[in-house]
Image (spheres, rainbow, N blue to C red):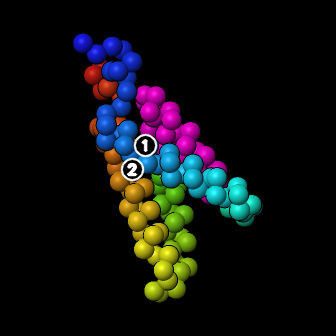
């Protein structure tokens, strides 16, 4: 019989997606601070928001997943704007499209019924 804490934990696809986003954005924040990229403040704020709302979604707070989706959409738009300024054949396009795919999949999983905590989904 699962206890209350186990019931509140998100399902494994959501945990996997949240873990990937957490690792990626933690790495991004560290790299931006190390580089001293002051002009990237919106990217740092977005990454910190993604980290905070990933943790809150992992903890099962129902409203946090929609704010996480909003931050994911914001990141996809930001990457799309940057890719629009790349020259055709630029080597950064492939990596940027891979990031967009990751964030789109993450947003889809978080917004789907998998994104609901088990205690909230049961009610």
Q: Which quadrant, please, contains the C terminus?
A: top left
Q: Are marks 2 and 1 in contact (CB under 8 Å)?
A: yes
The residues tagged by marks 2 and 1 sit, at their Cα atoms, a distance apart of 7 Å
Residue 43 drawn at (x, y percent): 62, 57
Residue 45 drawn at (x, y percent): 64, 50
Q: Specify whether residue 46 is painted magenta.
A: yes
User: In the image, what residue occupies the spot 42% across and 55% down?
Assistant: 103
Query: Which image quarter: residue 122?
Result: top left
- Magenta part, dominant SS: helix
The earlier-in-sequence mark between 2 and 1 is 1
Q: Which quadrant, please, contains the N terminus?
A: top left
Binning the other alpha carbons within 10 Å of mark 2 as few (below 14), some (14 to 19) or many (20 upward) gives: many
Q: Which residue is mark 1?
A: 18
Query: Which image quarter: residue 111?
Result: top left
Tell which of 30 and 51 is nearer to you. 30
Mark 2, secondary structure of its residue: helix
Read off the magenta span. 42-69
Residue 57 drawn at (x, y percent): 45, 34
Q: How many marks?
A: 2
- Up/down of 61 relative to 101, above or below: above
Query: Which image quarter: residue 4?
Result: top left
Mark 1, secondary structure of its residue: helix
User: In the image, what residue occupies the spot 46% across and 28% down?
Assistant: 59
Residue furthest out toward the left: 1
- Up/down of 70 relative to 55, above or below: below
- Could one spot residue 7 in this view of the protein? yes
Q: Nearer the viewer, mark 2 or mark 1?
A: 1
- Could one spot residue 111 in this view of the protein? no
Q: Which residue is mark 2?
A: 106
Residue furthest out toward the bottom: 88
User: In the image, what residue occupies the spot 58% across and 56% down?
Assistant: 28
User: In the image, what residue occupies the spot 64% across and 52% down?
Assistant: 30
């Amino acid at each position: 019989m699962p206890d209350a804490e186990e019931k509140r934990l998100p399902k494994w696809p959501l945990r996997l997606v949240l873990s990937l986003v957490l690792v990626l954005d933690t790495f991004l924040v560290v790299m931006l601070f190390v580089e001293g990229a002051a002009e990237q403040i919106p990217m740092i704020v977005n990454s910190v928001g993604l980290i905070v709302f990933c943790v809150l979604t992992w903890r099962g707070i129902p409203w946090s997943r929609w704010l996480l989706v909003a931050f994911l959409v914001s990141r996809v738009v930001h990457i799309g704007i940057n890719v629009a300024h790349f020259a055709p054949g630029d080597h950064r396009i492939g990596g940027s499209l891979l990031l967009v795919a990751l964030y789109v999949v993450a947003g889809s999983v978080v917004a789907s019924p998998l994104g609901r905590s088990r205690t909230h989904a049961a009610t």
